Amino acid sequence: MSIIIDGKAISKRIRESIKRKVDECKMNGLIPNLSVVLVGEDPASKVYARNKQKACKEVGIKSTVVKLEENTSEQELLEIIYRLNQDNTIHGILVQLPLPNHIDEKRIINAIDLSKDVDGFHPMHSGMLMNGQAILEPCTPKGIIRLIEETKQNIEGKNAVVIGRSNIVGKPVAIMLLQKNATVTIAHSRTENLAKLASTADILVVAIGKPRFIDRNYVKEGAIVIDVGITSVNGALVGDVDFDDVKEKAGYITPVPGGVGPMTITMLLENTLIAAKGAI
Ligand code: NAP
């Protein structure tokens, strides 16, 4: 039977510490400030933006959501980013993805001032992560590493398998695990014998977006299993891991919801604080 890695409780503890640091900043006249840019009416994006704003409020970070029409042009959006880049009272800029199809996401992300890119998606940040010089690390991978560290199990020397190779989750988390001296394999949709490979992992991170895809056959006895996936199924959020099947075999497991999700937002708060303090 697994120990559940309670992302909600861990987040709560980290947020309390962030709140204390934000209070200190405020006593010194610095009000950490995050600007969330939301384009269009995508219901999930609206919920994510609202949750981020709520979390900011909880720790005393000022936040505003810049709401833009679905038909906002790429040029108009770029001009808004340039304005936010120039505004010295704003420390973090986050553009809620996905953007409407007529806007080139990469161009928008690249336009965000490096020191305000609290999502850590700018290619310069990816490069710094690769070199072991990251300051603003991408929020989900950063949260995943914290969750693994919470188990107090060694990462060094362990076999880690990351399933999924996206730029925002799979690749960066693999780099981070490598920097912690795990032996890392990245798997994806073309990987052969995935179950055989995954079941060699002491640490298994799954970020594929396929509800309950990973059952006990993919899991080594006693492994740490981190479920990043979130898919809405009949109105409920479902992970990539078949929790009920895997929990009997894994040593540690994250639930969905209440695992990686809250940690992602918590790491966003932490990154906003880092950006506000001008550490970069
Ligand atoms: P993505 O960009 O769609 O990437 C999915 C990855 O999974 C791809 O690399 C794909 O391989 C791989 N894949 C898909 N089907 C597979 C299969 N059957 N076997 C092996 N690999 C497979 O997704 P993402 O942005 O990384 O997100 C992944 C999931 O995490 C989604 O459910 C997303 O909602 C969730 N997510 C959660 C959080 C959070 O805060 N909890 C944050 C970000 C994402 P190919 O490259 O070969 O296509």
Image: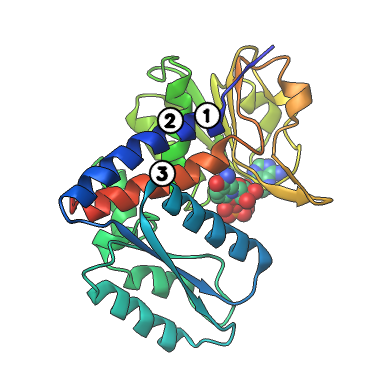
In percent of width and height, residue 173 lies at 45, 39
- Residue 86 in the figure: left or right of residue 66: left
- Badge 2 crowding class, 10 Å Cα cut-off, few under 14, some 14 to 19, many 20 or more, is few
The amino acid at mark 2 is Arg
Placement of 133 over or under 12, stated as above or below: below
Q: Is residue 116 above or below residue 103?
A: above
Query: Can you tell me whether the CB of the residue at mark 1 lies under 8 Å from the nearest atom of ligand 1?
Result: no
Image mark for residue 64: none
Residue 48 lies in quadrant: bottom right
| Residue located beneath label 3 in the image | 267
Mark 3 or mark 1: which comes first in sequence?
A: 1
Farthest front residue in view: 27
**Label ID, residue 13:** 2
Circle 2: element type = helix
**Crowd around label 3: few <14 · some 14–19 · many ≥20 (10 Å):** many
Mark 2 in CB contact with mark 1 (< 8 angstroms): yes
Specify whether residue 197 is in view. Answer: yes
**Mark 3 or mark 1, whichever is nearer to me:** 1
The answer, for residue 137, to whether it is visible in the render is: no
Q: Position of residue 9 (x, y in %)?
A: 52, 29
Q: Could you say where residue 271 lies in the image, as x and y percent from the top left?
A: 33, 49
Foreground of the two, 141 or 56: 56
Q: Is residue 192 left or right of residue 167?
A: right
